[in-house]
Image (cartoon, rainbow, N blue to C red):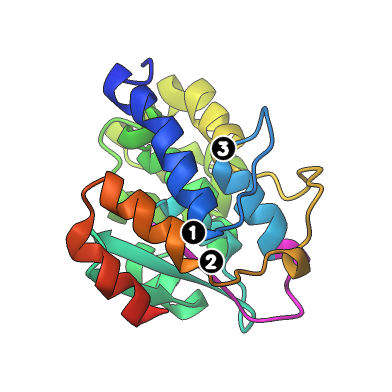
Amino acid sequence: QATPDILRQQMGLIRQVIDTLGIPVVEMAGFEAEDCLATLATAARDDEVIIVTGDRDTYQLVKDPQVKVLYNRRGVSDYLLLDEAGVREKTGVTPEMYVQYAALRGDVSDNLPGVAGVGEKTAAKLINELGGIDGIYAHLDKTTPKVRESLRTSEEHVRRNVEAMTLVRTVPLEITPADIVWTPPDPAPVRELFGFLEFRSLIDRYFEAV
């Protein structure tokens, strides 16, 4: 669906706040934000990487011991730090197989339908026993009649889900992880902007934090 007008109207202010706080911005036309995260996380694997996000697609990037996901389950107060074992415990599959699992389960937030009658537990079971989407479709005879029929009629969009959910790790960014350094900004413009936006309760808290 189209971006709501009320959000579109606020984008200029959001940009202004980010610029005033000196927060580095990474973007590339034609790519999702998660693709930029995937590219930077892959490039920075010699260092410790923690991806802070509410998007489960980033589970595919987790790699011990370098890359972890700090998943915010609710707002900004409830986080879960996931390594490979954490992803497996939460989903039932390894990070390498997460896309295959998610393709079966579907993703309502991205408007990607899953296979009817195949929930998270069944998807994990199929992946682990039959070895991914190709293995599942090569061994449909090993599934129950009801699941078999659902899989057969859903194959086209399941394979499309795999393509859509696989993050791009080669976005041609003009910035490297080493370039992304935050420097505390000049306090005066921050106080002025926060005052204009009536973020009065945040002003002192922000400067105490930095």
Rendered residue at 78%/54% (across/down):
175
Rendered residue at 62%/84% (across/down):
65
Q: What distance separates the C-alpha of mark 2 from that of mark 1?
A: 6 Å
Residue 117 in the figure: left or right of residue 55 = left
The answer to which of marks 2 and 1 sits earlier in the sequence is: 1
Q: Is 54 located above or below residue 111 in the figure?
A: below
**Which labelled disc corresponds to residue 201?**
none
Instruction: Report if the CB atoms under discs 2 and 1 are less than 8 Å apart.
Output: yes
In the picture of the structure, the residue carrying the numbered disc 1 is: 21
Residue type at the position of mark 1: Leu
> Does residue 135 appear anywhere in the picture?
no
Outermost residue toward the bottom in this view:
65
Residue type at the position of mark 3: Val
Q: Is 181 located above or below residue 107 in the figure?
A: below
Q: Nearer the viewer's eye, disc 3 or disc 2?
A: 2
In the picture of the structure, the residue carrying the numbered disc 3 is: 162
Query: Where does the magenta region start and end?
Result: 42-53
**Which labelled disc corresponds to residue 185?**
2
Count of picture labels: 3
Q: Position of residue 38 (x, y in %)?
A: 64, 54
Residue 24 in the figure: left or right of residue 2 = right
Q: What distance separates the C-alpha of mark 3 from that of mark 2?
A: 42 Å
Disc 3 on helix, strand or loop?
helix
Disc 2 on helix, strand or loop?
loop
Q: Position of residue 96 (x, y in %)?
A: 60, 61
Q: Residues within 10 Å of mark 3 (few under 14, many from 20)?
A: some
Residue type at the position of mark 2: Pro
